[in-house]
Image (tube, rainbow, N blue to C red):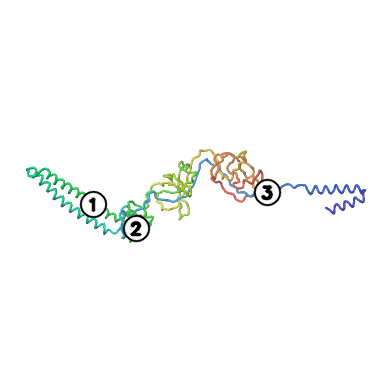
Amino acid sequence: MRIAIERSVTSAKKRLPSGLVIVGVAVLIAGCNAEASKPKAPTATVQPVQVMTVTVETANSTWNYTGTVRPRFESDVGFRVAGKIVSRHVDIGKAVTAGQLIAKLDETDLQLAVEVQVAELRAALTSREQLVAAEARFQTLLEKGYVAQAALDQRRAAADEARSRVLRAERNLDIARNQLSYTQLEAAAAGVVTSLSAEAGQVVAAGQTVARIAQIAELEVAVAIPEHLAQAVMAATAEVSVWNSVAAEKSARMPARLREMSPDADRTTRTFPARFSLPSGVALELGRTATVHLTRSGGSAPVVRLPISAIMNDGRDAHVFVLDGQTRVRRTAVVVANLGPTEATVSAGLKTGDRVVSMGVHRLDEGQPVRIVDERASTN
C-alpha cells in the first residue's frame, strides 16, 4: 500500500500544484487508516453438544433397582445346652429336611444327670408308699379310738409331702431327659445351610450359633430404596426379573409385592432397606442378582422425560434447544409438569422424534451452530 501511495504522489506532483498534492495525499492516507481500523464481524463458535431423541409416552413413573434373592425366613440355630461337639453332619450349601440331624454334643454328663434323677424318683416313690400306708393305718386307729386326731394329721402331712416329692422328682427327671435330647441339634424346618460357625471338637455355650438355615419355601428380593422415593414406592406396582448367568440375560418378569420397608434409613447410604415377596413356588438360587421394576401410574396425559441438564430457565420461561437440521439449534419453550432430582417431565412443547440437546445447553444461543459429539435415545 505504501508503494501505491508513493506512486500516486509522484503522479500527482507531475499533474497538480504542490498544495493540492499534499491535500490529496492526506485524504488517501486517512481512507486507508479508516479501512484498516474497521471492526470485523464476529464468527459464531461451534459448540460441542450431546443430543437425545425424545419419545412421547404416558405419564407413568418407572424405577429399576438391583437387589439379591433372599429367603424370607433365615435363622441361626444352636444347642440349648453347653457342651463339646462330637460330630457335625451337614455342610454349607446342603439341603436339610425338618428333623434332620445337624450336629451332636457329648452326652456323658447329661446321661449321668438322668440316672441321678431316676434314682431320686425311686427313693421318692418308696418314701411315698411308706408314708401313705402309715396314713391309712392311723386313719383306722383313729376310727377305733386308739389315737388322737393330731397323730393322724401328722401322718397325713408327711404323706402329702411324700407325694409332692415324687412329683418334683418326676419333673426333674423330665428336665434331665430334655437336656439330654438337646445334645442333638436338628433342623426345625426344611431349608439350606448357608453358614457354619462351629466344628467338631469345639466347646460351645448354650445358645451359641452353630449353623444358619435359610428356608427356601418363601423367597424375596432385598433392595435399597433411595430416600426421596420411599413414599412413592409404596404405591407402585412391582415386577421382578432375575439374571440368568447361563443365558447371559434377564428372565421374564414375574409379579412381586412389597412386604416390608424399614422405617429407618441406613445411616451411611441414606437408603431404606425393602423386601419384595416373590410368588409361592418360585425356585431360585439364593444370592442371585435380581432387578425390581417399579411402575407408578401418573395418568394418560402424554409427556416427555428429559434429564435435568436439558432444561434451561432464564426467568421468562423454561426452554430447551432442539436441533434444527444438523448443525444449528433453535430455542423451544416447554411446560415442565414435574421436576425430580435427576429427571424432568415435560407436558408440552415437544413431539416424538425431536432431537433435544441434553448436555451443553448453558453455552447455547438461538441459531448457534453446534457439533454433535454424542447422540442417545430417549431416557424413557
Q: Residue at x 23, y 51 (%)?
A: 172
Mark earlier in primary sequence (2, 1): 2
Return the x and y of residue 59 as percentages of the image width and height: 52, 40
Q: Amino acid at mark 1?
A: Asn
Label 2, residues with CA under 10 Å away: few <14, some 14-19, many ≥20: some
SS type, badge 2:
loop
> Which of pointers 2 and 1 indicates the residue nearer the eye?
1
Front residue of this view, candidates 173 and 380? 173
Label disc, if present, on residue 172 of the rendered structure? 1
Mark earlier in primary sequence (3, 1): 3
In this rendering, the count of numbered labels is: 3
Q: Amino acid at mark 3?
A: Thr
Q: Check disc 3 and report the residue beneath it.
A: 45
Q: Amino acid at mark 2?
A: Val
Mark earlier in primary sequence (3, 2): 3
Label disc, if present, on residue 90 of the rendered structure? 2
Asked whether the beta carbons under mark 3 and mark 1 sit within 8 Å of each other, the answer is no
The Cα–Cα distance between marks 2 and 1, rounded to whole angstroms, is: 33 Å
Label 1, residues with CA under 10 Å away: few <14, some 14-19, many ≥20: some
> Which of pointers 3 and 1 indicates the residue nearer the eye?
1
The Cα–Cα distance between marks 3 and 1, rounded to whole angstroms, is: 95 Å
